[in-house]
Amino acid sequence: MANLLTLQLASKRPDIRRAHEGCVWRDVDGSVCGRSLIAGEQRWLDWFDVGLLAFSDRSPVVKVWPVPGMTLDMARAEFDRMLRPIVLQALGWQALHAGAALTSEGALLFCGRSGAGKSTTAYALGQMGWTQLADDQVVWRLHDGRPKVQALPFKPRLRPLSSVHLAAQASARSP
């Protein structure tokens, strides 16, 4: 189901006044940046900088009502980078703020605070022949008693100095 989640622009904004609040997410400065809402089987994610997203476990379609100025392409980028794992977690997956590389033995995950080097490590291992599996978000669940990581769409995001250093290393290895 993870790869099947698609974001779709919705028209008439739903009435969410009868929904009760679930989780609240805070930004690094402590301000609230999003919240989940629940009413029966319907669930919403109200992400203040993106818009209202509606989803349920009955459909792979996630509907979005973007905030003013947010295009569908911009909403998709935020959905892929950050919101898809939150929706998947609400649908039964586990989500980690992590980078990951695929080895011959399975996935190797790197968890830590922002700026700790998760993305850089996963990217560097990708440059050494492993497959970079995730940059910032990893979702997984148990399958036959073993953890199974689900690859999600991502674009590697490196800090400028890391990008320059790893590009220099790649050039030094090239014949």
Image: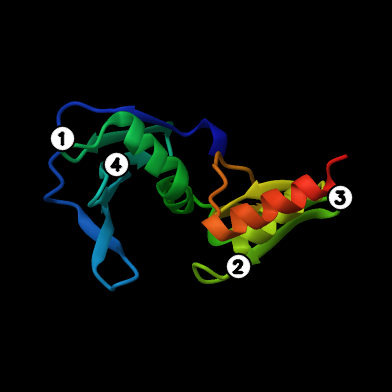
**Front disc: 1 or 3:** 3
Which residue is identified by label 2?
Answer: 111
What secondary structure is marked by label 3? loop
Residue appearing at x 19%, y 26% in the figure: 11
From the top left corner, tell me how far across and down residue 160 is, in percent. 53, 55
Q: From mark 2 to mark 1, how far is it between C-alphas?
A: 37 Å
Quadrant in which the C terminus is drawn: top right
From the top left corner, tell me how far across and down residue 29 is, in percent. 29, 72
**Front disc: 2 or 4:** 2
**Residue 100 appears in view:** no
Q: In this picture, is 152 found above or below 158? A: above
Residue 104 is labelled as 3
What secondary structure is marked by label 4? strand
Which residue is identified by label 4?
Answer: 53
Q: Is residue 40 left or right of residue 155?
A: left
Q: From mark 1 to mark 3, how far is it between C-alphas?
A: 47 Å
